[in-house]
Amino acid sequence: MMLWLTLTLLWSPTCWAGALYGRGGGSYFSTTEDNENEITGIRVFIGIAGIIKSIQVRFGSSWSEKYGAPGGTPQEFLLQPGEYITRVDGSYKIFLRHLVIYTSYGHDATFGENGGRSFSAFPDGSEKVLTGVFGQHKPLGISSIGFDWDYPIVDP
């Protein structure tokens, strides 16, 4: 009985980490958890053929380190005060190719060129918002991406 329970848990589709979108492989990255500042912007670096090479996230007024491959042309999307990211759509082939960021104010921003396998990422609760980004990258670009969702920070 114990063996069956162990095998069931190991083979279950439940995952401790969030879903990764993309083929994967390479080095892992993850934004550092910030319990004091909300996400206030996204910067995406686009390479040749529309490949998404790397990404940065702005928490409060500070940008995270650049996650991914070097190079690329930066494109930036800054949020208004009180605005949150509520959904991310995208597509990938060998590398991440396309991201569309949707916000609580009805704004959206598009990065890269659509093509390949599509995905849509959103929180499991209507009140949750984007709080972090993680994934994998290779020398030419981001090979997979995932999103952390949680409730917005409440001021005391």
Image (cartoon, rainbow, N blue to C red):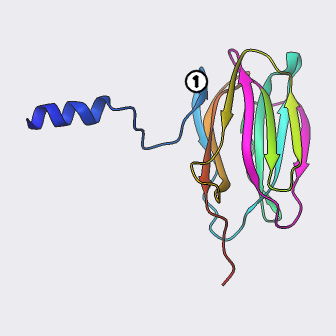
Front residue of 44/72: it is 44
- Which quadrant: the N terminus? top left
Q: Which residues are magenta?
A: 70-97
Crowd tier of the residue under label 1, counting other residues whose Cα lies within 10 Å: few below 14, some 14–19, many 20 or above: some
Q: Is residue 122 left or right of residue 73?
A: left
Quadrant hosting residue 34: bottom right
- Is 78 situated above or below 47? below
- Is 17 situated above or below 105? above
Identify residue for label 1: 24
- Check if residue 108 falls in the magenta segment: no
- Which quadrant: the C terminus? bottom right
Front residue of 43/108: it is 108
Q: Is residue 27 left or right of residue 64?
A: left
The image shows residue 33 at horizontal and vertical percentages of 60, 59
Please state which amino acid type lies under the numbered disc 1: Gly
Front residue of 24/140: it is 24
The image shows residue 102 at horizontal and vertical percentages of 80, 45
Residue farthest along the front direction in this orientation: 126
- Is 25 situated above or below 20? above
Residue farthest along the left direction in this orientation: 1
The image shows residue 14 at horizontal and vertical percentages of 40, 38
Residue in the image at 21% along x and 30% along y: 7
Residue in the image at 74% along x and 53% along y: 64
- Check if residue 94 falls in the magenta segment: yes
Residue in the image at 33% along x and 32% along y: 12
Task: Determine the secondary structure under disc 1.
Answer: loop
Front residue of 21/122: it is 122
Quadrant hosting residue 94: top right
- Is 26 situated above or below 84? above
Residue farthest along the bottom direction in this orientation: 156
